[in-house]
Amino acid sequence: MKDLVNNPPHYNKGNIECIDAIEAMLTHEEYVGYLRGNSLKYRWRFRYKNGIQDLEKAKWYENRLMEVLNNNNKGAKNG
């Protein structure tokens, strides 16, 4: 069975994942906003579209956001 939350095949064409390309083209603040917005989108619609799967996607974006913020904080302390 395909993992449509953590590794959706439609976002993995070629040698780079779509999320990594998005991160590369945005500033840090823009990327943080992107992650926050996607989390909200999935939480907003979960009752009307994909239920639990949308909540899992929201959690994925929130986990990615925490990872990005933690990495940024580590860099700020070392810099």
Image (tube, grey):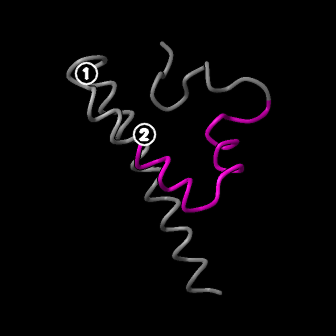
**Foreground residue, 15 or 21?**
21
**Magenta segment, prevailing SS (helix, strand or loop):** helix
Q: Quadrant of residue 42?
A: top left
Which residue corresponds to the image point at 41% horizontal and 49% vertical from the top-left? Answer: 36
Q: Position of residue 31 (x, y in %)?
A: 56, 53
Residue most extreme to the top: 1
Q: Locate residue 9 relative to residue 54 in the image: left or right.
A: right
Which residue corresponds to the image point at 56% horizontal and 71% vertical from the top-left? Answer: 72
Q: Earlier in the sequence, mark 1 or mark 2?
A: 2
As helix, strand or loop, the secondary structure at mark 2 comes to helix
Asked if residue 21 is positioned above or below residue 52 in the image, the reply reads below
Q: Nearer the viewer, mark 1 or mark 2?
A: 2
Q: Can you say which quadrant of the picture contains the C terminus?
A: bottom right
Residue most extreme to the right: 15
Which amino acid type is shown beneath numbered disc 1? Gly
Q: Locate residue 58 relative to residue 23 in the image: left or right.
A: left
Q: Quadrant of residue 9?
A: top right
Which amino acid type is shown beneath numbered disc 2? Asn
Q: Quadrant of residue 12?
A: top right
Q: Which residue is mark 2?
A: 38
Query: Magenta stretch: residue 76 in it?
Result: no
Which residue corresponds to the image point at 50% horizontal and 56% vertical from the top-left? Answer: 32
Q: Position of residue 11 (x, y in %)?
A: 62, 26
Asked if residue 8 is positioned above or below residue 26 in the image, the reply reads above
Magenta stretch bounds: 15-38
Q: CA distance from mark 1 to mark 2?
A: 15 Å
Mark 1 residue crowding within 10 angstroms, few (<14) / some (14–19) / many (20+): few
As helix, strand or loop, the secondary structure at mark 1 comes to loop
Q: Position of residue 19 (x, y in %)?
A: 61, 40
Q: Position of residue 48 (x, y in %)?
A: 23, 18
Q: Which residue is mark 1?
A: 51
